[in-house]
Structure formats: C-alpha cells, structure tokens
Image: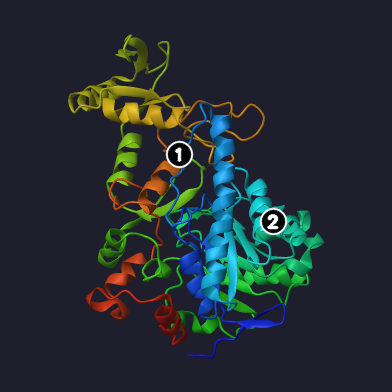
Amino acid sequence: MKHLQPLIINRRDYLPLIEGGKGISVSNGESSGAWAKAGGIGTFSGVNADSYDQNGNIIPIIYKGTTRRERHIELIHYSIQGGIAQAQKAHDIAGGQGRIHMNVLWEMAAAEQILHGVLEGAKGLIHGVTCGAGMPYRIAEISAQYGVSYFPIVSSARAFRALWKRAYHRFPEFLGGVVYEDPWLAGGHNGLSNSEDPDQPEPPYPRVVELRRVMKECGLDHIPVVMAGGVWRLDEWEDWIDNPDIGKVAFQFGTRPLLTVESPISQVWKQRLLELKSGDVYLNRFSPTGFYSSAVKNAFLSGLRGRSERQVAYTTHPHGEHEAAHGIGPRQRIVYLTAKDLVAVKNWETQGFTEALRTPESTLIFVTPAEAEEIRRDQIDCMGCLSQCIFSNWSQHEGNTTGKSPDPRSFCIQKTLQTISHSDDIDHQLMFAGHNAYRFASDPFYAHGFIPTVKQLMDRLQTGQ
C-alpha cells in the first residue's frame, strides 16, 4: 500500500488516522487518549459526557428540576463538567502524544454555551473541535477564540461552500480540515438532504472531488479532506492517497474503534458487533432531530417501525372517504377514518394496540397501553437535550416549544443513549453503527472473538488492513 502522508498541523506531524466521535459516552477520554497516544487524533464526545467522583466512579445524572427549563439548565452544567473530565482523562492517557479533539453536535442543546464552558475549563487539553449534525456556522468563531482548530463535518460541497461564505472565511487560519461524512454509510446521524434519495447511494469519490474543487476556489489547497463513513481498511482507499484530485487526505474511523479494549461500551455490545450480518444496520428517520440516522436492527427499531406502520390518517368531521366513525381515548372521542383503515384499526386493537396517539400530521398511531404510558412519561420528563425536539416539542429558543404537537412516532434520544452506554441492554435501546459494522464477523483480524487494544488496531490500520 502507498505510504500514508502525515497530517501537519501547527508544525507537528500526526498519523492521518482519526477516531470518529460517538456520543453519548461511547467515545470518551479513555478511548480518545489511547488513540492519540498511538500518534493519531483521538476524539471524545462532548455530548452529555460522563463526570467522575473522587473515587473515579461515574456520577449518575439525576435531574431535580420540575420543569423542562430547569432540567435543561442542569443538563448544561452536567455537560460542561463531563466534557472537562473527559478532556483531562484523554490528556493524561495521551501523555503529550497525538491530538485530542472534542466532537459536538450543532443540534444538541446549548451547543455554543457548552463549547465555551468546556474549552474554557479545559484550556490546553483540547486541540480541535469537530462538529456536524446541522450547519455549524459559529464553530469557527468559537474555536478561534480559544486558539483551537475546527473541523466541520459536511456531506456535500454545497454545504461547505455555504459555511465558508457565511462564516469560515473570517477564520481560515484555524480551519484544521474538512470532514466529508458519507451520508449513506456513516453511523449515527447522517447528512442526507431533501434532494438526495436515501435508497440510492452515491459514490463518495466524485462528491469529494467536488468538495476539493470548492476548497481550491476558497484558497484551501493545503487543508486536508477527512474521509469519514464507510472507511474500514485503507488498502480499499489507496487510489485516494497522493491523488491530485483529492489532495491532502486523512481517514476517520467511527465503527472500528468501538471494538477495542479501551472502548467503554459493554461486553454485550461488543459481542453483538462480532455477530452482525450485512443489512443489519438500518438507515431510518425516527430520530427526534429530524435527521436520518443509521443504527443496528433490534427490538427498539422494530418497535419504532411498528408504530409508523400502525398509522392512519383521520379527520374530526366526515370528509371525502373519511366517513367511518371510530371512538378513541378514554372518552371515546369520535374521529373519522376510511372504511379500509377502520378494518386495519380494529385488527390492531384485537392484537392489543388499543391506544391511539395523535401525530402532528393529522394521523393516528396505535400502540399498547404500556407503550402509550412510556411515550407520555418520556415526553413529560424531557430535559431539553436538543436545540429542538420533534418527540417532545421542546425548543431551547423563546417559549421552549417548537409550536407543534409532540410526535409519538419518535423517541427520547437522551434516555436511550444514556441507557445503552451505561448498561447491557442492547436490544431495547438505540444502537448506532456504521453500515460496514457487519465486517467484524468476517475480518480475520477479529477471528475467534479477538478484541484489540487501540494501539493494535492503529498498527493494523497502517498496514492497509
């Protein structure tokens, strides 16, 4: 395989191998510190990161506020303290080697306030910030204020052009790299636009060539492009190395670092990764962010699919084909369905899906009484973890509401990601993963259930495999 050219940032050389940030508490100080110690760029998640007590035990996040706004303020405090704690741990483990980056989602709650809090509280410990899940216009200004590099995550040249023209052109000296994240292959939230078909993947090469062309127009020939999403082994990307159409390039690995000794996920989760088959990762749009996301098929996703499949349109008065009256709720309020949908509803009810919940789109979904109670409780317990949430109708902006009805077809993302990252429950929680995760089962490196250290994985990656 061609020799990997080092990344040169602030006159220091680094391996062009980057750990992809994964929240909540899935990329932490231990994993990112080990990655940096091996000479690469380690990335911890700054999304509601864990804090520790004086004995090194994780401090449980317990909200005491009685309102969403009060809990939202508590969440910001927890997040800042957690981000500082993870930065310190990563710094201590790295021992001055490599680089430590913090990953944040622009659509997470109070992203700007948390960034300021962590970067101020962890001065000298964090070298860069990666940021996606939205259009992070202000990430350049915030990073520059603290003297750290910024690495925006985009899924198209058009998105980067917009960011550059609006904000980034004012802070070019702090731009460390542009991360192209393949919207069809990456794990977690994906940057598919409304003009792109989720069922028709486009190859990354022409999209990255176009990104490089735009970067050249902006005078950014010297800035590396970081390929992310779908990267498993580098010999499959050899034609990208020393390619003038691509230019300086680095590679980000999100899924493979999950299966390392230092990865904080449970052993149950690691074992599940070793057993995945092609097609076990599902691109869906259930996330309360409104974005597409990729996750492992399990009972949790099956439940969400079932909710949407048990869905019918309704009217409050007879209209057109909606002439079949049906009573819903404790008071049996009358709604009107089509005759065909009424047959389906009665069939669902005989199966135990007797609770009808209204969606913002004038439809009803049918769930069991236990599911309905859980949905309502999760909506009530909202702590405002996103800038705005489809599921609970929270918004961090004035009024703290999106102005729309809560959508029961979605879920509380904070609850499920906290649970899966701190327990063995991988069947009834959201398990993010990239679409290449099935390759753990066939890659000889992981034969007989072998789980490498981060250093062993990094050495393996440098061979091309």
Residue behind mark 2: 120
Among the two numbered marks 1 and 2 on one chain, the one whose residue lies closer to the N terminus: 1
**Relative image position of residue 416 (x, y in whole percent):** 39, 44
Task: Name above or below for residue 448 compared with residue 21.
Answer: below
Q: Quadrant of residue 166?
A: bottom right
| Closer to the camera in the image, 274 or 233 | 274
Under mark 1, the amino acid is Ile
Query: Would you say residue 291 is visible in this rendering?
Result: yes
- Could you tell whether 142 is left or right of 453 in the image? right
- Please tell me in which quadrant of the rendered image residue 368 appears: top left
The residue type indicated by label 2 comes to Glu
How would you rate the neighbour count of disc 2 (Cα within 10 Å): few for under 14, some for 14-19, many for 20 or more? some
Residue denoted by label 1: 62
Q: Is residue 151 left or right of residue 411?
A: right
Task: Give the x, y percent position of residue 215.
Answer: 71, 69
User: Could you say which disc has been placed on residue 405 in the image?
Assistant: none
Element marked by disc 2: helix
Where does the image place residue 318, in percent across and percent down from the top left? 40, 11
Looking at the rendering, in which quadrant would you find the C terminus?
bottom left
